[in-house]
Amino acid sequence: MATIGRLVAVLAGTGLSLWVLLSAVRAVVLPRGEVVLLTRWLFIAIRSVFGVYIKRRKTYEAGDRALAFYAPISLVALPFTWLALVVAGFTSIDWGFGVDPLRRAFFMSGSSLLTLGTEPPTDLPTHVAAFVEAALGLGLLALLISYLPSIYSAFQRREQLVTLLTTRAGAPPSPITIIERHHALDRLDDLDEIWDDWERWFADVEETHTSQPSLVFFRSITHDRSWITSAGCVLDTAALRASTLDLPRNARAELCLRAGYLCLRRIADYYGVDHDPDPRPDDPITIERAEFDELCDELADFGVALRSDRDAAWQAFHGWRVNYDTVLLALAGLVAAPYAPWSSDRSPRYHRPPLMGMRHRRE
């Protein structure tokens, strides 16, 4: 009976160690947006701790300063979680190989993982386990070290365009501001210059924020900027350009719109956000007709030329907005984005992502 128990301990420890290794490879090496349960559980647990803290903050700025530490702390905690589970796994293996008592097996596992040599193995099986554990520990740390530069490189690429948008759209970014500023400079036609850059930005964000999902929670350098509110501003501006402004049709704006809502949908899928993958043009959106009319009146008062048929403009804008309305607001709530019109000003509160897998959808 004791022999069976030790065999089970070896198998369980081996399974746990392999699961940790596979989780690390999927989180760091595999260039696909797959849910890694260990990483997700860790990030959710740490976010719950931060949630308790930020509820006590009296201002958004104070909560934003606290949340700025959330993603970095979670990333730092990730390798320690890997190592702790590997120690647990090899403690079970060493005990299964006959190392008694369990406390000594734990010391041997920790000594092997950290290559301390304070608790030497006793026979061939424990020597082999020590060698494997030492290599596994070094490999896990090396994976994370190689992972960090790619994360911060993607973050810098993302934030460069977010920062540039502030010049055009203000802080917080607003589609009214970006249109009025271009009109005031007598360069409304030059609004079309931004679509190609933002189409590439959406493609890059979709790839990086699903394969490296912690990037979703990395916050901008100031409390009034966010990647998600910037995305919402650009999408709303493109939708207004395609539906409401009295300008010749430009396919680049519409391609940017499609790149944008596909990007946000796939990130939302990763975090289990429920949305319709094929909405009807007349499905409800969170923008009221009165809000749209108020925006049009303000633009008209500023001297911006609008299309004469306001009803047709509203229907066209509605048809574009319905493609990203739900996911935009859900992601703004997920990351606790700062105030911005038509996005975080009506987003739901933070809702914990599901503990298990993502939803798979086809576009």
Image (spheres, grey):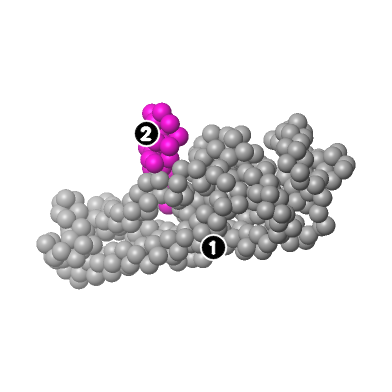
Q: Nearer the viewer, mark 1 or mark 2?
A: 2
**Number of other residues with Cα within 10 Å of mark 2, as a class: few under 14, some 14 to 19, many 20 or more:** few
Residue 84 seen in render: yes
Query: What residue appears at the point 47 percent right and 50 percent down from the top-left corner?
Result: 220
Question: Type of residue at label 1?
Answer: Arg
Q: Residue furthest front?
A: 185
Q: Is residue 44 above or below residue 349?
A: below
Q: Please give the range of residues in magenta.
A: 39-67
Question: Which residue is painted at 37% across and 37% down in the image?
Answer: 49
Left or right of 48: which side holds 194? right
Q: Nearer the viewer, residue 79 or 301?
A: 301
Amino acid beneath label 2: Tyr
Quadrant hosting residue 129? bottom left
Q: Is residue 187 left or right of residue 89?
A: right
Q: Secondary structure at mark 2?
A: helix
Q: Nearer the viewer, residue 97 or 251?
A: 251
The residue carrying mark 2 is: 53
What main secondary structure does the magenta stretch of the protein show? helix
Quadrant occupied by the C terminus: bottom right
Q: Is residue 41 magenta?
A: yes
Q: Which residue shows up at 61% across the image and 34% down it?
A: 346
Q: Which residue is mark 1?
A: 32
Between 327 and 123, the residue placed more toward the observer is 327
Query: Quick one: 194 or 281, which is closer to the camera?
Result: 194
Where is residue 351 shown, x and y percent of the image?
A: 52, 37
